[in-house]
Image (cartoon, helix red, strand yellow):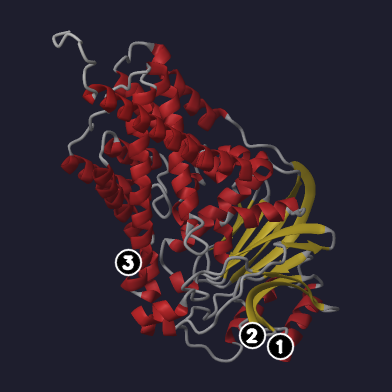
Amino acid sequence: MTLAPAPRPLLPLWAAVLASAVGGAVLDAAYPDIGWWPLAFVGVAFALVSLIGRSVGGALLVGVVFGASFYLIHILWITRYLGVIPWFALAGIETLFMGLGSILLALAYRWFPRVWPGRWARLIGLPALVGGVWTLREQFMGSWPYTGFPWGRLGMSQSESPLAHVASWLGVSGLTFVMVLFTAAVIEWLRAGRLRDARTAAPAAAAAVLLVAVPAFPTSDAGTWRVGAVQGNGPSAYFDQREPYEVLNAQLDASEPILDDDVDVLVWPEGGIGYDPLQDPATAAALDGLSVRADAPLIVNAATERGDDIFNTSLLWTAENGAEQLHDKANPVPMGEYVPDRWFFEAIVPDLIGLIQREYTPGTNAPFFDVDGVGVGLAICFDVIYDEVIWDGARDGAELYVFQTNNADFRDTDENFQQLAFARMRAIETGRSVVNLSTVGTSQIIDPTGATIESLPTDVAGAMVADVPLRSGLTPAVLIGPAVQAILGWGSLAVLVGLGAFVRVRSRRRADTTTAPAPEGADAGR
């Protein structure tokens, strides 16, 4: 088999760098607060066109430019309290990973058409490989270093689009894959230059149908549950000045108007207590009194101490038994809730690291409460971005989710809206309602289709009461999500490695044949 020549770049390097810079900014605009979801495809197209035909060095350069353009905008909210150093540090490492992953994308564009140069292979196989490699990069960035940072996943940009329903079948990673597959297929259709041949548009059209026409997977109606949710708007940010029990009192005051309502459960946000009710008798007494007045169990959150460990803990609290069930946050935030390799980072930025005195321990208990026979899935703040936490809750029997968060450190930034988008996508992905509750807002109760049932604006104290739909049954995303990720990630990597090995072997044989001396006695002019 003779190898086809390597593809030439579609853009000169200077134009590719410019396109990457534009593409990263355009991609960010697909996410909240702007939230123009179709721009996600435009941003991906800029990235892919810039990588076609690139060398390893060129791919690294344009990938770094794309990553920097995206992340420096996307996580600008970090500077709200922490300043520019953490912003540059986190955006910098994510940018580096984007650049390294872009090398793999460029190699896919270089190697695949050399091995399979046929038209249909280019129209179908190449887009599938590109989509898989993009997803592989996302999965790596979402799990390493430490617990990773899966904040900029492409599929999460579609939480309010008509394409979000794909996530109920394939998960967020699967949605990312189909989006990139579609974009890459359109690019290959245009590159083929046979626009009058309708057959060549079939792969891109099939991906478009998958994105648009597939309905959400239907979960089963399991009744309703009357939920009260309270946003106290107390001084709960890290650097807020507060009086003793001021955060707790703010939550109690905001709960007052709904205490006569017949709720099945009363929910407070992350950090809504201020003290550990397992250690502080006054806080425990206040929660007991609230449970009695509401005539309902409470789902609250606090930092709790058990032995030498500190946990970020959700508690199911009743006046009769106190803390009946506990769930500890599975993925404390590196550099926020604990400092990995503290000795190393203190040597670099001692003043910033010195601000983080509390070291949270990762939890190992299930993200699930059984509340009077109703299963409640849980995710504390940034745990909402980790698939395993969400899927575990559904598999344990969750009929709805409660996501407790404290956004007070990021008031007036896009972080609040981006996290709300994750909550909305989780509702669609699992086919379950979500109570997404913040200390300072915006808080919302979301139904299984992603529609808002009730909401509270930011920076106000208030409470919501709603009859929240319950659902049973598992979506395909929950059942096969890990397999989808493994196939897309490891499968794409295996294909790419196989292509590279094939190209290397064939190129070496060709070189050996070209440089081999002519047999003795052979006609030199033959």
Tell me the mark number nearer the camera, choosing from 2 and 3. 3
Horizontal and vertical percent position of residue 432 = 68, 49
Residue 184: tell me if it is visible: yes
Q: Residue at x 53, y 44 (%)?
A: 173
Q: Is residue 514 left or right of residue 145?
A: left
Residue 275's mark? Answer: 2
Mark 1 to mark 3: distance in Å?
A: 39 Å
Secondary structure type for disc 2: loop
Residue furthest left as drawn: 525
- In the rendered structure, the answer to whether residue 262 lies left or right of residue 283 reads right
Query: Which residue in the structure is indicated by mark 1?
Result: 279
Q: Identify the residue position indicated by label 3 in the image.
A: 88
Of the image marks 1 and 3, the number of the one nearer the N terminus: 3
The answer to the question of whether label 2 and label 1 lie on touching residues, with beta carbons closer than 8 A, is: yes
Residue 499: % across, % down: 41, 32
Amino acid at circle 3: Phe
Q: Is residue 126 above or below residue 42?
A: above
Q: Residue at x 38, y 64 (%)?
A: 90
Which numbered marker is on residue 91? none
Residue 349 appearing in the image: no
Of the image marks 2 and 3, the number of the one nearer the N terminus = 3
Q: Residues within 10 Å of mark 3 (few under 14, many from 20)?
A: some
Kind of residue indicated by mark 2? Tyr
Q: Nearer the viewer, residue 391 or 137?
A: 137
